[in-house]
Image (tube, rainbow, N blue to C red):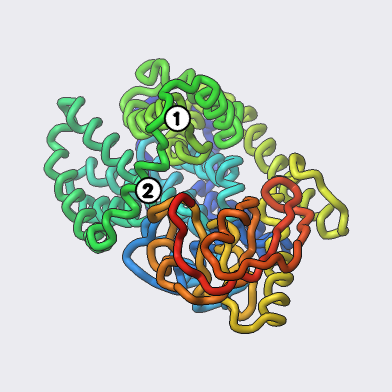
Amino acid sequence: MIPDAPVQTPVTIRSAVPAPGIASPSYGAMAAWVILAITAARLLWLAFQSAGLYPDEAQYWFWSRHLAFGYYSKPPLVAWLIALTTAIFGNGEFAVRLSAPLLHAVASGFVYGIAARLYDRRIGYWSALAYATLPGVSLSAFLISTDAVLLPCWAAALYTFIRARENDGLGWWVATGCAIGLGLLAKYAMAYWLLSAFGFAVLRPSERRHLRGLLVALGIAALIVAPNVWWNWSHHFATYLHTRDNADLGGSLFHPRELGYFVLSQLGVFGPIYFVAMLALFAAPTRFGGPPARLLTTFAWPSLIIIAIVSLLSRAQPNWAAPAYVSAVVLVVEAALRRGWRRTVIFSIALHLGAAIVLFGGSELIASEGLSVPAKFDPLHRLRGWRQLGDAVAAQLAVHPGLRLMTDDREIVAALIYYVHPHPFDAVIWDPVPGISNQWDLENNLSRHRGENFLAVTVHNLADQMRKDFGEFTELTTIDIKSGPNGGQTYTLYIARDYRGATAGN
């Protein structure tokens, strides 16, 4: 988990000198034990918490039951990992999410290696601990997502890139290519890493000798990601087009409020002290750390600037810039320790750990007592209620056999496929918007089921439009769930018979 890292000190660092006769601490071993302890605590919490899968997690689990080289909205690596963990430990929420904390442990190990190679093991220890306790990492470690898969790939690529630069060895360039390729199979945001690496090599004359190695790495990465490219080609480039559409650059291209929201959200992702310090360091990387700082800055600021521009032109989710913090956390920690601000680093780590315990542990404790937590105070409110909805829908399917499950929402169908038993893998979506907009439209389009009968679970009040597509459309019941995306939701169920195809004008 902790890459080998001999001591190197290309810049002057203020560090404590042990007294004569006292052995210096083994920072590598300390980092490994601390990361192991944090990961064990996260696994324990996952094993006993009561929150259900988020719909995206349920969707990834659905993908893992149908392994492929690609899917409508994401590359395939997250589904492959879920297939592995659930094959070993079953299909419970714990098994679905199992790889998330383990992946962040791996990323923490590579952060240690990055800092130790560029500075020393002491910086590596505090950088790994700082990364492992970042607010965004704490959240990501409790959910299986493409970010949890991407970040260790990003960190591994940066570590192997640093090693390859030291001696220009072919093996390290091949390792870099493997990390890049896996990163692209995790999330296409790995392309920002390539932008940073080639920019660093091209714009700095002393680094141009590494361009050949980078091209070797790029070739290896291309071979690894080739099956996903083939899948996209055979599916009309579905994932690439979805990624483009997700940026939503087709409307008004000036949203200063969205930019402000994105910037403020990074205080929660990276931590308030680290984020402010990072901005100060980005303003003068040469003054604050020399060549290592320039390298770390190059692998951070392009991602942040690109996502900030996207937020100004359209919108951006807080997690989209997360890879930037792999190198930024090393930059901030090194600058703080060099100035003797170790207490500030410790305070930030304690602040982040305390916030995670209060937010996640506190809300879970209250929920376990059967008390109602207002959605705005419950960071897990979007994970609650899906199990109850699944049980209620399963009961209706049992009473009305022969009906195929249908919903009018992608999140609902993903959650219900997971929580309804037996799992309705053949569920479909009714969508008034023409075209392909999700995995179910792509692989099991409603148009293939003319003449069939359905149990429709709806949330968007589109009954009048839906009724036109069926020979019979009868309201069955409503289900009230006290938790969900808005803290509470009413679902209306219909029996829809004799599907006649989409009516023109829907």
Which of the numbered marks, if any, corresponds to residue 366? none
Mark 1 lies on residue: 314
Which residue lies at the image location 42% right of the left edge and 32% below the top edge? 307
Q: Is 320 in front, or is 440? A: 440
Which residue lies at the image location 51% right of the left edge and 76% below the top edge? 452
Which residue lies at the image location 54% right of the left edge and 60% below the top edge? 468
Q: Are marks 2 and 1 in contact (CB under 8 Å)?
A: no
Q: How far across and how far down the image is residue 419, in percent?
A: 64, 70
Q: In the image, 320: left or right of 136?
A: left
Q: How far across and how far down the image is residue 190, in percent?
A: 34, 45
Q: Is 427 in front, or is 417? A: 427
Q: CA distance from mark 2 to mark 1?
A: 15 Å
Type of amino acid under label 1? Ser
Mark 2 lies on residue: 242
Indicate whether 126 appears above or below 443. above
Q: Secondary structure at mark 1?
A: loop
Q: Is 246 in front, or is 346? A: 246
Type of amino acid under label 2? His
- Residue 466 in sight in this render: yes
Q: In the image, 143: left or right of 364?
A: left
Q: How far across and how far down the image is residue 394, in percent?
A: 68, 75
Are there few (<14), some (14-19), or many (20+) residues within 10 Å of tag 1? many
Q: How far across and how far down the image is residue 310, in percent?
A: 41, 30
